[in-house]
Amino acid sequence: MSELRWNPLLGTWTMVASNRKLRPTMPKDWCPFCPGEGKKVPSEFTVYAYDNDFPALTQHPEAPFVDETGFYKSAENHGKCEVILYSPRHSVKFYELSVGHIIDLLELISDRCTALAADKKIKYVYPFENKGEAVGVTMPHPHGQIYGYPFVPQKIETELKNCKDHYEETQRCLLCQMNQAEQKSDLRIVAENDSFLAYIPFFTDYPYGVFVVPKRHFSMLSECTAKEKEDLARMLKVVTHAFDELFNAPFPYMMVYHQRPVNSPEYDDANDYYHFHIEFYPPFREANKIKYYASSEMGAWAAANTSAVEETAPVLRKLVTKIIEREESND
């Protein structure tokens, strides 16, 4: 069964995708993402995109289930799910990729976002990465994904509403003001370069929940200049490296790209008030200790951070500084 079901309590869609139960889980002796004969991936590639074998959204949806009472609402799960392979190397870490390689990756993600947005039924294009078994990864080969939703997801709707409300009240972008506040405080800044800031925001619910935010105001990854793509590549490289050095072990995370909706007339003015950014959700609060989303977080949406980010950000910033100094001494 594959469809959308409307949740009238929350005013949003739930995706039903029973085919995803068939996904392979951490295979030991083979990898569908590694180059080789008889696979969907080419024998040679740098970065590569292809259709997800177990999509939650599809270009050829089935007729949805019809509730016999007529009370509940369902819809076709029209959309697109793609896999983005970061490298042909099975065990390479993100930060071990060269800056040029990461730029190629960002350009591929940007191009695929534009391609998905050409489907007028798609309303939101969402690139993301899940890394590590702690966040439910089923394939260890380094990869991300892109979902093209036929609706604007609820969290994005909430961000858009609050950004628009702030803009209408102040005539200023909320994320631009966050950047200014974080720079003025300097307590939570993790890294900075010409084009981007990385900081753990004042309010985040993860101890190491880094935001990567461009200094210039724009609302889509595709609007990055060549210089900004290079600076974003360098920023993601050093932040992910610092994560792994935090507890001297592979550090799991979810990394998500937030950009404005597409094919949505109600958001035609979103470029005025919405600001592209990347958010990290790392589940570790200490070495091998997970910060779970438990009853308060899931049942009431009332988040609790186990650490003040003024304590965690300096730790990560110190690691970033050491990594940069080490790289400069090796040049």
Image (tube, helix red, strand yellow):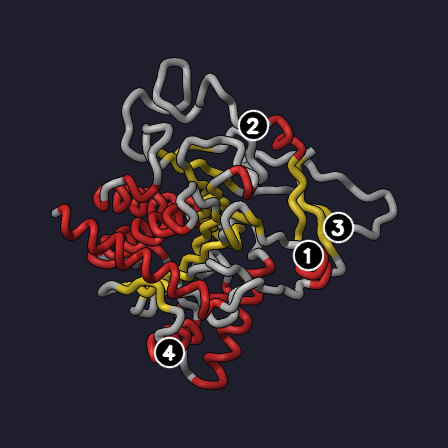
Amino acid type, callout 4: Ser
The dot on residue 298 is 1
Mark 4 is surrounded, within 10 Å at the Cα level, by few (under 14), some (14 to 19) or many (20 or more) other residues, namely: few
Percent position of residue 189, x then y: 36, 68
Tag 2: amino acid: Thr
Q: Is residue 273 left or right of residue 298?
A: left
On the question of residue 266 being in view, the answer is no
Secondary structure under tag 1 reads helix
Q: Earlier in the sequence, mark 2 or mark 1?
A: 2
Disc 2: which residue:
25
Tell me which residue sits at (41%, 19%) in the image. 39
Q: Quadrant of residue 55?
A: top right
Q: Does residue 121 lie above or below 91 as drawn?
A: below
Image position, residue 119 (x, y; %): 47, 46
Mark 2 / mark 4, whichever is N-terminal:
2
| Crowding at mark 3 (Cα within 10 Å: few <14, some 14-19, many 20+) | some
Position of residue 113 measured from the top left corner of the image (x, y, whole percent): 40, 48
Q: Position of residue 309 (x, y in %)?
A: 47, 67
Q: What amino acid is at disc 3?
A: Lys
In the image, what residue type sits under mark 1? Answer: Met
Dot 1 or dot 4, earlier in sequence: 4
Image-based side of 185 in relation to 138, left or right: left
Q: Which mark is on residue 185?
A: 4
Badge 3 or badge 1: first in the primary sequence = 3
Question: Residue visible at 76% across and 60% down?
Answer: 9
Q: Which residue is at 49% across, 73% downward?
A: 163
Nearer mark to the viewer, of 3 and 1 = 1
Calculate the distance from the C-alpha at mark 1 to the C-alpha at mark 4.
31 Å
